[in-house]
Image (cartoon, coloured by chain):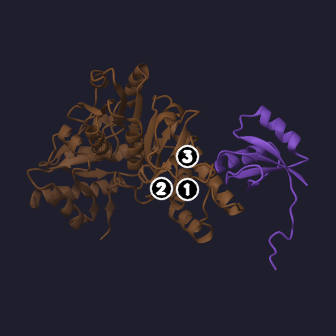
Amino acid sequence: MDTIYFDNAATSFPKAPGVGSAMAELLEHGAFNVGRGGYEGAYLLSARVLDTRERLARLLGVPEDGSVCFTAGVTAALNQFLKGTLHPGDHVIVSSMEHNAVMRPLRTLERGGVAVSTAPCNADGTLDPQRVRDLFRPNTRAVVCTHASNVCGTLLPVEEIGRLCRERQLRFAVDAAQTAGIFPIDMAKMHIDFLAFPGHKGLRGPQGVGGFAVSAALAAEMLPLIEGGTGSRSDSELQPEFLPDRFESGTLPLPAIIGLRQALTELEKTGTEPLLARERQLTEQFLRGLAELPGCRVAGIADPGRMEERLGVVSVDFSPADNAMAAFLLEQRAGIMTRVGLHCAPAAHKTLGTFPQGTVRFSFGPENTPEEVRQCLGCLHDILKKEI
Amino acid sequence: MTAYYILFDNHEQAVRLHGQLRMGGLGSVIAPTPRSVSVCCGVSLMISEEEIGAVRTFLSHHACVYRSVERVEQEFNPRRDAYC
C-alpha cells in the first residue's frame, strides 16, 4: 500500500533533496571537528558551518549585530532563552497557544519565583495584541509567543506584539517551530530579540539540529545554560563572552548542520513564497472537503477564505468518536500518516475547545499533492460513514 | 623567517576574514596559532611578510573582526619532531 505523509508539523518528510547524501558524504569522507583540529579539513568544514549560519541569518532577517547559535533543536533553544533570561521576581507573558517546550520550563521557573501570565487567544487560535498589552506590569521582562500554532496552524500577530515589546523595552522571544522555512520572518522588522527554530521541520533538514537567532543586546544579558569547551580562549576557565561560543560548548552536531546547509541551498532556489502558496492551496482544498463531511469539526480557522491567517496544519475533532480510532483507520485503510492527541500543547487545545479528547492533526508539506488530499478526503468519507 | 599572524577570538572569525581577504585578492593561510603569541588554542591567519602591508591596509578599510596582528620570527627546526 502506498503511504501519504501528513505529519510535516512533527518533522518534514521527505527531507530536501540531497540532505541525506550531504550528511553521508561528510561522515564517509571527513567528519572532522571544527574549532579544534589544526588542519585544512577542519578549516574547510568550519567554513561550511559558518556559511550555514550566514544563510540562516539572511533567511531570518537577523539584525546586523545579531548572531545565529546552534542547539540540539528548538526545545533546547527555548529553554536557553527562558532559563537564561528570567529570574525570580520577573514577570513573563505568553499566549494561550504555546507548546510545552515553552510551558514546561515556565512552570518550573514559576516554582522558583517567576510570575507567568497568559494572554487568552480566541477560540480559533487568533490573538488580539491588546490582550498582551493588558497584562503588562512594571516587572514584566519578556513576552514569549509562538509564531504559528502547532495544533491548528493559526498565525499569531508577532509583528504587532514585537512593536508593543519594543515600546516597553521588553524582551520578545518567538517560537518559530512551525514557520521557519515556510513563512517569511524578519527579526529586525518584527522586533524579535530571540527566535528559536528547528532545522528539521519547515527548513527540511535532518533531526538533531536547530538553534536560535539572538540580538546582541539580549545575548549579552542571557546566561548560557551549558558551559564548557569551545575551542577558543582555552587558557581561561571562564566561558567566553563572544558569540556564538558563549552558547555553543561541546562539539556541534556537524553532520546535521551540513544536512541543514544542503536544505537551505534547496530553499534558496525557490524562496518560501511558492512553498507557502502550495501548502495553503492544499489546506484550502482540505478544508472545503471537510466542510462537506458530517461528523467532524475543524479546530481553529475552518473558513477556507481565511488562508492568509494560517499555515497548512489542520486539526480535526471526530468526537464523540475516538480520535485515535480515526487516525488508526486512516493509516490502516489508506496509509495516511497523521498525529493524534494533544500535540504537546494542552493550553492550545483548551483554547480551541478540544481538551482532553485532542484532535487528529493533518500537516502538509511541499511534496504533498492535491491527489493525496483528495484520497484522504475520500478515506475520511468512508470511515465516517461506516466505521466510527 | 618573519611571518605575521592575525589572531581571533574563535575559528569562524578566522574563516570569515580568510574569505574576505581572498575576495580582496590577498593571500592568507589558516594555521594553528603559534604558542609564542597566544596561549589560546585557536586558529590564526598566517600572512607573508610581502603581503602584510596590503593586508593591514585592507583591515583598516573594511569591517573585519579580529583581535590583533602579531609578528613572529619563526625558527622552524626541520628536525624538531625527529626523535631517533
User: Which mark, by number, is residue A196?
Assistant: none
The amino acid on which the numbered mark 3 sits, given as a three-letter code, is Leu
Subunit of label 1? A
Of callouts 2 and 1, the N-terminal one: 2
Q: Are marks 1 and 3 in contact (CB under 8 Å)?
A: no
Q: Which residue is mark 2?
A: A205
Q: Are marks 2 and 1 in contact (CB under 8 Å)?
A: yes
In the rendered view, tell whether residue A332 sits above or below residue A16: below
Q: Position of residue A302 (x, y in %)?
A: 23, 39
Closer to viewer: mark 3 or mark 2: 3
Label 3 to label 2, Cα distance in Å?
Answer: 33 Å
Label 2 to label 1, Cα distance in Å?
Answer: 8 Å
Subunit of label 2? A
- Looking at the rendered image, the quarter that the N terminus of chain A falls into is bottom left
Q: Are the residues under marks 1 and 3 on the same chain? A: yes
Is residue A175 visible in this depiction of the protein? Answer: no
Q: Residue furthest left?
A: A320
- Looking at the rendered image, the quarter that the C terminus of chain A falls into is bottom left
Q: Position of residue A140 (x, y in %)?
A: 34, 26
In the rendered view, tell whether residue B84 sits above or below residue B72: below
Residues packed near mark 2 inside 10 Å, few (<14), some (14 to 19) or many (20 plus) = many
User: Which mark, by number, is residue A238?
Assistant: 3
Quarter location, residue A129: top left
**Chain drawn in purple:** B
In the rendered view, tell whether residue A280 sits above or below residue A11: above
Q: Nearer the viewer, residue A295 or A114?
A: A114
Residues packed near mark 3 inside 10 Å, few (<14), some (14 to 19) or many (20 plus) = few
**Chain drawn in brown:** A
